[in-house]
Image (cartoon, rainbow, N blue to C red):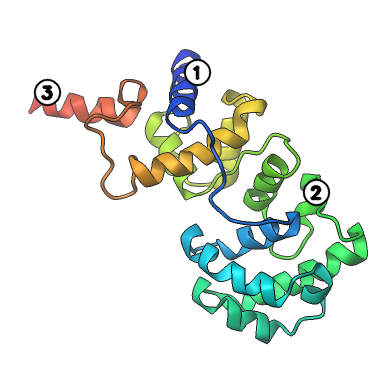
Amino acid sequence: MASKAAIKRIIETLKEIYPDALCSLQYEKDYELLFAVRLSAQCTDERVNKVTPALFARFPTLESFAEADPKEVGEYIHSCGFFNGKARDLVACAQQLLEKHGGKVPGTMEELTALPGVGRKTANLILGDIFGQEGYVCDTHCIRITGRLGITDGSKDPLQVERQLRQCIPPKESSNFCHRMVLFGRDTCTARSPKCEGCPLAKDCAAAKALKAVKVKA
């Protein structure tokens, strides 16, 4: 597993590469980010950003979402995949936000995960981006890259990875760290063909070190 010194270097290097560490999902209202994250499940952020402008224009308020026919919502989000379930979740979520939270996105893990379609990954992102709290967003990029780096033990279970990250990534760094994992995963540490040669994290990466050792033996 990566040492504390190595993890600190990784955090600082990623800060230099991605100083802004912004979520790539586009939104104006808090609940729009909540809905956009739901749409991003098994879908790219790029696709979600193409879909949401028309969706949010058609349903410009939380009230309009709460009153919407899920079938019509589904027509706007069809290309995001699993649109029937996602549409039902958006409408039901809007209804609960109005009925139980005064039309506001709640700011605790327990309240967020009680909303339709909201799991820990979504809740962590909302806590970090909307409320400035700690947010360990364990998406596919974060799970893959932290495992390769040796920050986690290689587990593919999001909850297990979250627990391990909580032990070694400072809470104040957590949200931005996870956003940077996404950006780094798109640019360099891709799923199929990671660019290990010239990678700025290679000196602290368990996978890169293992690959180098194999080449030396060969």
Residue 34 position within the rendered picture, expressed as x and y whole percent measured from the top left: 69, 57
- In front: mark 1 or mark 2? 1
Mark 2 secondary-structure assignment: helix
Q: Is residue 115 above or below residue 214?
A: below
The amino acid type found where label 3 is placed reads Val
Specify the label residue 17 is tagged with.
Answer: none
Name the residue rendered at 75%, 71% in the picture. 60
Alpha-carbon distance for marks 1 and 2? Answer: 30 Å
Depth order, front residue of 188/27: 27
Q: Is residue 173 above or below residue 145?
A: above
Q: Can residue 44 be seen by looking at this rendering?
A: no
- Name the N-terminal-most of marks 1 and 2: 1
Residue under label 3, please give it: 216
- Name the N-terminal-most of marks 1 and 3: 1
The amino acid type found where label 1 is placed reads Lys
Residue under label 1, please give it: 8
Q: Can residue 167 be seen by looking at this rendering?
A: yes
- In front: mark 1 or mark 3? 1
Mark 3 secondary-structure assignment: helix
Depth order, front residue of 39/157: 39
Residue 32 position within the rendered picture, expressed as x and y whole percent measured from the top left: 70, 60
Name the residue rendered at 50%, 18% in the picture. 8
The amino acid type found where label 2 is placed reads Glu
Residue furthest left in the image: 218
Residue under label 2, please give it: 110
